[in-house]
Image (cartoon, helix red, strand yellow):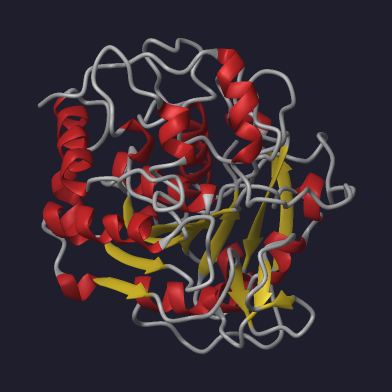
Amino acid sequence: MSFPHPTALPTALLAASLLTLAPTGVHAATAIKPAATKDAPALPAYQADLSQTTVSGLSSGGFMAAQFAVAYSATVAGAGIIAGGPYFCSGQPGRFPYIPYLTNALTTCMNPGETQVAPPVASELLRAANDFARANLIDDTANLKRQRVYLFSATKDRTVTRPVVEQVGKFYALAGTPAAQIRFVDNVGAGHAILTDSSGDKPCAATQSPFINDCNYVQARDILQHLYPDLLPSSTTLTGKVIAFNQRRFIQGAYSSMSNTAYAYIPKICDSESCRVHVVFHGCLQTTQAIGERFYTSTGYNQVADANKIIVLYPQAEPSPIHPYNPKGCWDFWGYTSINPIDPDFYRKSGTQMEAVKGMLDRLAARRGSR
């Protein structure tokens, strides 16, 4: 069965329902001034090795990581998905001419048991991906066989539950990815968060801003260790730097809900040698407007990257209260950035957010010193 381009939900329903995308009862933290302004400099070129590019993310960032890994599978070598679901999750169930993307995102793709619906079906989503690949909307799904995949579902997470996350593993298994390349961690008593071993972070079982929890577990290390099995121990003292750069220059669409400024961690060695790149997508309510620099400085990725010649790219979504309606700064996995609701493109290589991130990768790979 093919998946033609469907209609999206009416705008009024989108506005009314999207408020529930973040965990129930959770509100954004008091606004913290971002570390950089819209006048940030251009992203430098580092001659990065894109053949070893990987991605990861939490919640909407986990969905975005899965989406980007499938759409750009010729570039991405692996994905770490924390409390996220499979590619095109919000596109199923539904049949042409109507697919209720937002309803699916809030039910099928989050806590289907609580909302009394079925979880996503990996075989249907892979069939859709194969159709999109044949139409040259995404890369060949045969590339998925080489990817390494880390999946995480916490036992106390009621926002995105295990039945959703496990469909990512089934999606990859059906695509031919060997079982040895898929790691599924589902035995940690954590809430909806990315996990650290820092006593200054929230308690392990909490689901509250900034969604960075102390579980005596450096999740960033575990993700990167699976995606790059040759890792050296993490650095105790960082040698590199966090840079702020002008993200706006990579955004082509008018309704991106992406910030003017994004960030990257550059190990010192990458100033002179070619490094690989890992892209990290924050979750809803983890934007700089909500939690300042916490996500891109204290989640543990930079310490691992510093010792292992990895540039860490932190693209930034931002809250958008009017249009596109994205009040909690989530990444788009249901279509709010699509100008034409009859022909949404959020899941394609040409999607506004997807294309912007790929542009950042291409810039990092450009010849050092080039403009």
Residue 212, placed above or below residue 323:
below
Q: Residue at x 58, y 63 (%)?
A: 192
* Residue nearest the observer in this picture, 86 or 135: 86
Q: Quadrant of residue 90?
A: top left
* Residue nearest the observer in this picture, 133 or 277: 133
Q: Check the picture and name the quadrant holding the N terminus.
A: top left
Residue 91 locus on image (x, y percent): 33, 31
The answer to whether residue 247 is left or right of residue 365 is right
* Residue nearest the observer in this picture, 362 or 77: 77
Q: Can I make out residue 140 in this image?
A: no
Q: Quadrant of residue 15?
A: top right
Q: Can I make out residue 56 in this image?
A: yes
Q: Residue at x 35, y 40 (%)?
A: 89
The answer to whether residue 247 is left or right of residue 278 is right
Residue 321 locus on image (x, y percent): 74, 26
Residue 296 locus on image (x, y percent): 69, 61
The answer to whether residue 293 is left or right of residue 69 is right
Residue 292 locus on image (x, y percent): 81, 54
Q: Quadrant of residue 130?
A: top left
Q: Residue at x 39, y 24 (%)?
A: 100
